[in-house]
């Protein structure tokens, strides 16, 4: 076994406690952190998905900081482990996988002589952005962003200049490196390799789809990774502006990526029990914050189990206790998106404050207590979106978009139908309601202002 794979003796495998917020310490004060011992130029880490991952010095320095070590205790797919017991893999593993694939992509572009537009500094920033893109993640995946908390990208970019991680990044790449990494994570960089970090074929997707499928034990996340990486190309779309594109030979591999994403959303990420737990968790955390049991700032630094322990023990939160015991709300209504009116209003997915008021008002009408009725209609409209340059076999450049291209990319043409097939409207309840809930569909098509008026005057919502 390689040194990096063992439980002792490797910098990359040493666990650290999650950082604790304190108003008396400045996270940007790097004088508190001792200089680490010398780091070897590279280490090999064993990975169940990609086998051997070679980690260079810059990545090693970043890995062994509290900010990155915290990701060992954030599950990659939230509450999916309640359905798929093997889904306990973490954001830390995923970060290593995304970094590994980015190194492979850069090496492939260099081997084909297509890396002239990117400097060594560009490549360093992209590798580190792949490694650090999730450092701002909340516990339990994206649930708390759905609940109205700030985005994990914003939190992550802020952490790039703070504490030991900020110091190490400056050490390996100068004062501009954190800014360059932040721009890549935000999708705002002029780096020609930006598309490897965010875009139609970013390598974050390639790793999480492949890894999540493997760990959940499902066959849905199959991506033709080798073909996709070998088909990447850099295209000058405007004078001195380059984008990551795909060669014509890689179109089928791109389709495998898009279809894997559809299958994983339909069967794993939006599984009814996973979504029930997610809805319960959102309400539990929002309630704990409202009651002052925990702050948004503390949540942003917490780990999965740390946050659950806090809201169960300190907040005495019954929803959280039910999740931990896997006593999940059941489906009182479960409709495919094709049976849901097309004019469902955006507040259902984008206004958690109003949604919570509606849920509790509806619950009261059917004999249920606050938090005992939860509405779920998850939205991800760009699930199968495509927008990138295509280099044809003749050498010409075209653009692949959601409209597809005859004879080249057919999946986007049916993307809307696949999205509707994956999406479902569900109402979860803790107990059997006293009335049927089908009439809720009319309520969901009402504009937010009308719904607020009905709530203010105490009118029936059913």
Image: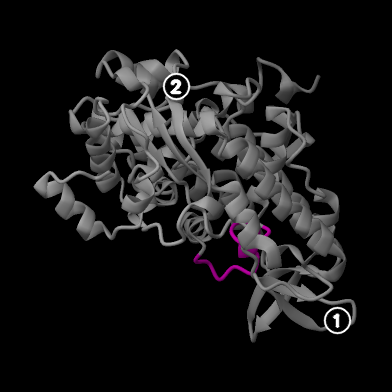
Camera sees residue 293 = yes
> Which of the two residues, 394 or 251, is positioned nearer the viewer here?
251
Within the magenta stretch, is there residue 194?
yes
The numbered mark, 1 or 2, whose residue comes first in the sequence reads 2
> Residue 317 placed where, x, y %?
28, 19
Residue shown at the point (29%, 37%) measured from the top left: 297
In the figure, is residue 294 to the left or right of 259? left
Camera sees residue 99 = no
Q: CA distance from mark 1 to mark 2?
A: 55 Å
Q: Which residue is mark 1?
A: 395
> Which of the two residues, 59 or 206, is positioned nearer the viewer here?
206
> Residue 46 placed where, x, y %?
75, 28
In this view, 219 is above or below 19:
below
Instruction: Rate crowding at label 2 as few (under 14), some (14 to 19) or many (20 or more) other CA atoms within 10 Å.
Output: many
Residue shown at the point (86%, 81%) measured from the top left: 395
> Which of the two residues, 101 or 252, is positioned nearer the viewer here?
252
Quadrant (top left, top right, bottom left, bottom right) of the N terminus: top right
In this view, 198 is above or below 133:
below
Range of residues picked out in magenta: 188-201
- Tell me the element at label 1: loop
> Residue 89 placed where, x, y %?
62, 27
Q: Residue furthest front?
A: 435
Residue shown at the point (29%, 38%) measured from the top left: 359
In this view, 445 is above or below 276:
below
Q: Which residue is mark 2?
A: 328
In the figure, is residue 124 to the left or right of 136? right
In the figure, is residue 144 to the left or right of 269? left
Quadrant (top left, top right, bottom left, bottom right) of the C terminus: top left
Q: Residue furthest bottom?
A: 239
């Amino acid at each position: 076994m390689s040194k990096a794979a063992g439980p002792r003796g490797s910098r990359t495998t040493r666990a650290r406690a999650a950082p604790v917020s304190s108003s008396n310490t400045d996270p940007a004060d790097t004088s508190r952190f001792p200089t680490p011992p010398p780091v070897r130029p590279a280490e090999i880490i064993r990975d169940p998905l990609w086998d051997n991952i070679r980690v260079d010095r810059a990545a090693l320095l970043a890995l062994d900081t509290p900010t990155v070590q915290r990701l060992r205790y954030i599950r990659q797919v939230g509450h999916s482990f309640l359905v798929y017991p093997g889904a306990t893999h973490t954001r830390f593993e995923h970060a290593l996988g995304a970094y590994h694939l980015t190194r492979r992509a850069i090496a492939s572009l260099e081997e084909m002589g297509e890396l002239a537009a990117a400097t060594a500094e560009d490549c360093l920033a992209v590798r580190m952005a792949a490694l650090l893109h999730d450092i701002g993640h909340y516990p339990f995946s994206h649930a708390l962003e759905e609940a109205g908390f700030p985005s994990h990208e914003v939190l992550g970019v802020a952490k790039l200049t703070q504490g030991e991680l900020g110091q190490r990044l400056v050490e390996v790449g100068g004062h501009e490196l954190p800014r360059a990494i932040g721009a890549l994570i935000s999708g705002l960089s002029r780096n020609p390799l930006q598309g490897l970090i965010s875009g139609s074929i970013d390598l974050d997707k390639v790793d999480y789809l492949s890894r999540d499928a493997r760990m959940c034990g499902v066959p849905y996340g199959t991506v033709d990774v080798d073909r996709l990486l070998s088909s990447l190309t850099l295209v000058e779309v405007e004078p001195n502006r380059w984008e990551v594109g795909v060669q014509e030979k890689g179109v089928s591999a791109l389709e495998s990526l898009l279809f894997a994403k559809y299958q994983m959303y339909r069967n794993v990420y939006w599984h009814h029990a996973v979504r029930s737990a997610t809805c319960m968790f959102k309400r539990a955390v929002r309630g704990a914050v409202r009651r002052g049991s925990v702050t948004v700032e503390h949540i942003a630094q917490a780990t999965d189990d740390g946050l659950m322990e806090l809201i169960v023990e300190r907040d005495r939160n019954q929803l959280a206790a039910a999740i931990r015991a896997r006593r999940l709300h059941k489906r009182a209504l479960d409709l495919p998106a094709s049976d849901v009116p097309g004019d469902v209003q955006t507040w259902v997915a984008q206004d958690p404050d109003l949604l919570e008021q509606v849920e509790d008002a509806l619950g009261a009408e059917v004999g249920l207590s606050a938090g005992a009725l939860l509405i779920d209609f998850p939205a991800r409209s760009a699930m199968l979106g495509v927008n990138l340059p295509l280099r044809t076999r003749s050498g010409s450049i075209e653009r692949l978009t959601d409209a597809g291209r005859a004879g080249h990319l057919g999946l986007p043409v049916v993307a809307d139908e696949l999205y509707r097939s994956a999406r479902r409207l569900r109402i979860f309840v803790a107990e059997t309601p006293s009335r049927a809930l089908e009439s809720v569909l009319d309520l969901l098509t009402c504009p937010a202002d009308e719904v607020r008026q009905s709530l203010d005057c105490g009118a029936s919502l059913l």
